[in-house]
Image: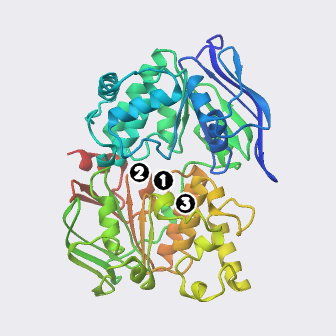
Amino acid sequence: MKDETEIVLDVRSITKTFGPTRALVNVSLTVRAGEVHALLGANGAGKSTLIKTLAGVYVPDSGSIRVGSEEVHLTDPLQARARGIAVIHQQLSVISSLTVAENFLIRSYSAKQSFVRNSAEASEHARRALDALGSTTRPSDMVSALTFGERQMLEIAIAISSQARVVIMDEPTSGLTAKEQGSLFAAIRQLVAAGVGIIYVSHKMNEVYEIADRITVLRNGSNAAEFSEAPWDRKRIVSSIIGETASEALVGDSDLVRVTGSEPVILEVKNLVTDRVAGVDFEVRRGEILGVYGVVGSGGPQLAEAVVGARSYTGSIRVNGAPAPRSVLNARRAHILFVPSDHRTRGAVAGQSIQENVLLGRGQWRRTAWRTVSADLHQRVEAATNRLGVRRHSLSQPISQLSGGNQQKAVFARATFDPPTLLVLEDPTQGVDVGAKRDMLNEIERQRAAGAAILMLSSEVSEFSTADRVLVLRDGLVVGELRRPHISEQEILQLSAD
């Protein structure tokens, strides 16, 4: 990208505070026409605050924002859209009770951009935009009937078709299949060719290295580093994110003591049938990490929910030789713990503090006076959150004030607070930075070494760096199994695609 290319977004010395918290301190960023500018940083580094400032959700305390040659003062999201800034948030804004075409129409009306004027135009506009992304979703489809990945593609289609000058994508491939990700990257390249500037936020480093033209790293609310061109110095980028010398290796395989066939079976699943799962058999032994890989729609979440008592099923699930509990509460009492991928709706309780979230569901905590806790229990919560690297001011802080990645780590701390017999993880490191991913995978290994049986379902191959075995799930069936040391990304993806 040449320096003389038109700057479509110029952010200068933006500062934003929330009480005593300095979320952004003199942050600057430029985006040029026809470039993908990746914005990276650890959870809590200030990325979400900057995105919300550019989206008009937050008003900065100081600094300036220019779109093209014009300085803008954004006080609400409608102003940002009208100025040509489109944002695709992690929390999707499409309206479930409307059709796909109606979502196009209402977004156009609310932004006062008039890229469509009536239902017929909205349907045609939606069809063209979705076809360009390779989506099979129809304009007449109800959004409530779409999968998460399909809703994500709809959100992207609306944003990129709204004649925006700058499109901000916050973790856009979360929940997408490999095919959908390929379609998204093709659409990004079309936007770039048309002169649109892209701010691309992701914790998936490989896709950043593939798609980005420049990279800016934030750390502790300030600019930490900028990298201007490939080939990328990957170690320097990761080190600038986490603030220490680091490689992208998360856990060293050479030092792991692997489970043997002589360990007792903790989890035994036979002929499991539930929604999207069509008859699955496997077992997990004490001190074993069993990975289950599957793309969106393969049945992984449904399998996890059946094991932890959150979904009805036929077949057999036994834990320590006894029938598995059929409710989440009874599963927890049996030390069967679950970390869901969607911490916002199924993990964290937004109205409670960090400490209350970590202690959620513990009988001793429920019997005490609400919001009071013994000094010993408080210290254990502090140790658990420190071990996972939860960035916070205090344990009494509302969990909703944390970044998404730190909320996920707090949910993980709850699941590992007491030693689990069986730990079920669903995309456990989704949306967390490379340093947090290292901490979480090390915690998984610590729990394995303490004797927990671990079932880890994921659509990210990198999460299986500590797995003893990996099952590949496709269309609700196990289509292959890999064992250490023959677990590789190539083999997993090959089995998934065959």
Query: What residue is disc 1 on?
Result: 430
- At 59% from the left and 25% from the top, the residue drawn is 229
| Nearest the eye: 193 or 71 | 71
Crowd band around label 1 with a 10 angstrom C-alpha radius: few (<14), some (14–19), many (20+)? many
In which quadrant of the rendered view does residue 226 lie? Answer: top right
Query: What residue is disc 3 on?
Result: 408
Q: Is residue 255 left or right of residue 106?
A: right
> What secondary structure is found at the residue carrying circle 3?
helix
> Disc 2 and disc 1: Cα gap in Å?
8 Å
Name the kind of residue labelled 3 in the image.
Gln
Query: What residue is disc 2 on?
Result: 460
Instruction: Check contact, mark 2 vs mark 1: CB within 8 A.
Output: yes
> What secondary structure is found at the residue carrying circle 2?
loop
Q: Is residue 12 left or right of residue 150?
A: right
| Nearest the eye: 189 or 72 | 72
Circle nearer the N terminus (1, 3): 3
